[in-house]
Amino acid sequence: MVSQTRPVHISSTGQQLDKTAVAGDSDASHHFSICRTSESNPACHTGNHVGQYYTLPPAHVRTLFSHGLPSRFQMQIKTFNEACVMVRQPAVELMSYLEKADYSKPAVRYLLYGETGCGKTMSLCHVLHFCFSQGWLVLHIPDAHLWVKNCSELLPSSSRPGRFDQPIQASQWLKNFKITNEQFLSKIKTTKRYVWTKREHTEEGRPLGELINQGVTRVKSSSDVVGAVLRELRLQVRGTSDAPFRLAVAVDGVNALWGRTTLKKEDKSEVSAEELTLTHNLRKMLRNDWSGGAILTTLSQTGSLYTSRSAYLPTELLGEVGFDQMDPFVPIPISAYNDQEFESCYLYYMDRNWLQHPHSKTEEGKKELIFLSNRNPSILERLLPALGHFLSFLSSRAGRRLQREQGQVQKNSTGTALRITLVPTEKYQHVKGFGGAMTDAAAINILSLSTKTQDQLLRQYFSPEGIEYSVVRVPMASCDFSTRLYTYADSPEDYSLLNFSLAEEDTRMKIPLIQRAQALSARPLALFASAWSSPAWLKTNGALIGKGSLKGKPGGKEYKTWAQYYIRFLEEYEKHNLSFWGLTTGNEPTAGEMTNYSFQALGFTPELQRDWIAMDLGPALHSSPYAQTRLIILDDNRFLLPYWARVVLSNVHAARYIHGIGVHWYWDHLTPAKFSLTTTHDLYPEYFILGTEACSGWSKLDPGVRLGSWERAEDYAHDIIEDLNNYVTGWTDWNLALDLSGGPNWVKNFVDSPIIVDQNKDVFYKQPTFYSMAHFSKFLCEGSQRIGVSFSEHTSLESSAFLRPDGSVVLIVLNRSDVELQFEVWDQTLGFLPANAPPHSILTLLWVTS
């Protein structure tokens, strides 16, 4: 279920919107208490939580587990759009030990062991989340067997004769270590001078982050850098109350460090684990000759090559040498999932609509699943969903709203004349995502509601139970959807931007809401920023509105100041732990070329934009900590393509700083997508195209808010499908929320929004356009790739098909006609999916392909 709603208005034309307030659902709450807990802080987990799932905050998943989760769990996150871990008794036991430990004494080694599939890795991840939440420095080695089994590059060590380096693996581990422990890297200083080459060295007293960067940027020295990092941590961690950090050393599959490898020398003889620089240094870290932390390990049958598949005891997997070097340790056995835990797992998958076994909802079907999986969730995941079934989600003018149905794939054609055939060999662009803009007006409207209703609104957009927006556009300072005109540097002649500061609209409204949205989202939010106008004192007309561009020429002080304004914006938002995926070069640069333009604008011709990027903005970003931020040109209507792209991207000095092209949907009817979007892609295929703004109600012929308008939902779906079929990677709606008049907007440029807020009643209305967005945003996760389709005959249906990273297929179909259209989908690896599209409807089909 996407949301709790009730219809409040259905007109004679079939228009419908949904009114949402905060209401309880006793059945849902009871179901939640059976298999899930709302307690996401592992420090609060006790025996009462055993058998329940808890949700890992998305920010912790990205930071702590950027590299440490099993592949099957990573796929589950992508499929379910959330990261849930079951609370198991061994993890609770281990966390209890850590809470009571005396850290002035040598670090204790803990060893989790059990049969294959009993949950050792996920229990270790649970404990690591505990350590991370308590502010520990986390040194995590996931899948240690990969260090001795898979190696894309093995080189003789230049500093240690007889040893072998694995530079690519070492460099990647350093990158992930840096992501997890960024907060410590400037505080910990090196205790000695490290020499890497005749010309490169790291001085004593330098931040640990500088040492890590050496291994990341100079890959050949990365193995030695790992050893240096481990050495510094061992030397500096201590068990006193004023210790700078507590250290968790975690190795999944620790027995691999004493097992046989599959790596070969030039003479084809086997490389021993001890001969690997990484393994040698990690073994040192496992000695308990340091205090101030703990050593957390698991045993893995995968990590012990050439041993019996049934072996799982420490003596069997560690071997004599490994056992002696790990001894003493605290053994923590993990048993197979018990009835309660498997029941919780079963209910969780049912709740996520994952159990598509034909009889999964029956008691007999449940028994069959228990038998087939032997109460092993990892086996249960591989059994499901069953091939041969598909899900459909329907919204229509008649009042359907993401109505879910399940169907069965047929071996033979249904005989329907209209057939849509998947052509998976035709592969096109990958999806970035879908979302909306956190304008001042959107923030004002959301915050006008009670706290509970605010949370419900944000959940509708960003949480797994909602439509899972993953892109947020953020205006830099004011735009027309503000209540006043302002920039972040309104002090005249402040070319050094000494008085640059965010506004209250940022610090008190937009930033807190974006942070809350990020906390709710299971997907990382891709933030991108757009500026409407520079400060007036930098402009030729001396005003934020009207026709005006920057004074001077590219390369001059005005253009360089405007470039630094972007850097300062990124710096200030970073202080609030918000990083930006992208920046546009400015909202609708052609608006600032129009006489008497009514609201904020900054004029650029494509030639000026090209030169500003080449001479000012590009170099400023490149030399800043934000060099990886994607720079998006145009951010204006698509009828300007391909001309604008030709002017800017044909210049190599500008093009090297640019990543993508932003397009707005206004006046799309003037230029066919094939001639603007596809032509641009064909000319410059290395640059992505992203829809950066769209809204209904902008035209004087059809202005403002229209509650319950299905026609506008069709307009959205038509434009999105057309864009996707012409290489656009995502689509960003305009204001996330507006009031009943379509504002506030200081220039009274009122428009519509997928969510309309009624402050006086403490409710918000989900417009049909909300559900139109849902058919794309909820099902097309980042990384989904468009694939080809063909039609057996001419049809008025509009469609687009995608292969998701989890191996499932999404087909979105729009029927704007007045008649029901039956059709079948032919997946040549699976069979025929019978379907029908009611008049004026949007249909999303989802199935696992073979």
Image (cartoon, rainbow, N blue to C red):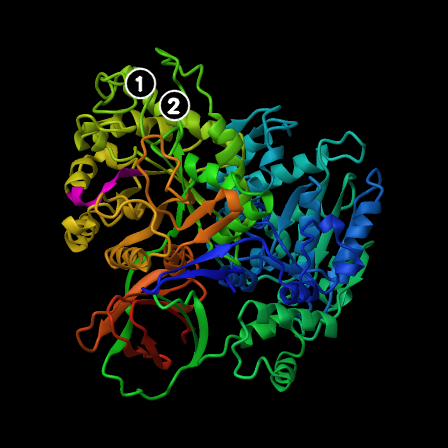
Q: Name the residue under label 1.
A: 536
Q: Which residue is drawn at 30% across and 28% down?
A: 600
Quadrant in the rendering for residue 147: bottom right
Q: Where is residue 473 in the image (x, y as percent from the top left)?
A: 39, 41
Q: Position of residue 551 (x, y in %)?
A: 23, 17
What number is the disc on residue 802?
none
Using the image as rendered, state which of residue 840 and residue 849 is in the foreground: 840
Report if residue 640 lies within the magenta region.
yes
Task: Please state the extent of the stretch shown in magenta in the rendering.
Answer: 632-642
The kind of secondary structure element at disc 1 is helix
Q: Do the residues labelled 1 and 2 touch (CB within 8 Å)?
A: yes
Q: Name the residue under label 2.
A: 487
Mark 2 neighbour class, 10 Å CA radius: few under 14, some 14 to 19, many 20 or more: many
Q: Where is residue 607 in the image (x, y as percent from the top left)?
A: 17, 30
Q: Which amino acid does label 1 sit on?
A: Ala
Q: Position of residue 219 (x, y in %)?
A: 47, 41
The kind of secondary structure element at disc 2 is loop
Relative to 244, residue 49 above or below: below
Instruction: Report whether residue 518 is seen.
Output: no
Instruction: Indicate left or right for 766 with 80 as reference.
Output: left
Q: Residue at x 39, y 46 (%)?
A: 436
Instruction: Report whether residue 646 is seen.
Output: yes
Instruction: Indicate left or right for 373 with 15 as reference.
Output: right
Relative to 165, residue 466 above or below: below
Mark 1 neighbour class, 10 Å CA radius: few under 14, some 14 to 19, many 20 or more: many
Using the image as rendered, state which of residue 321 and residue 628 is in the foreground: 628
For the image, the number of numbered tags is 2
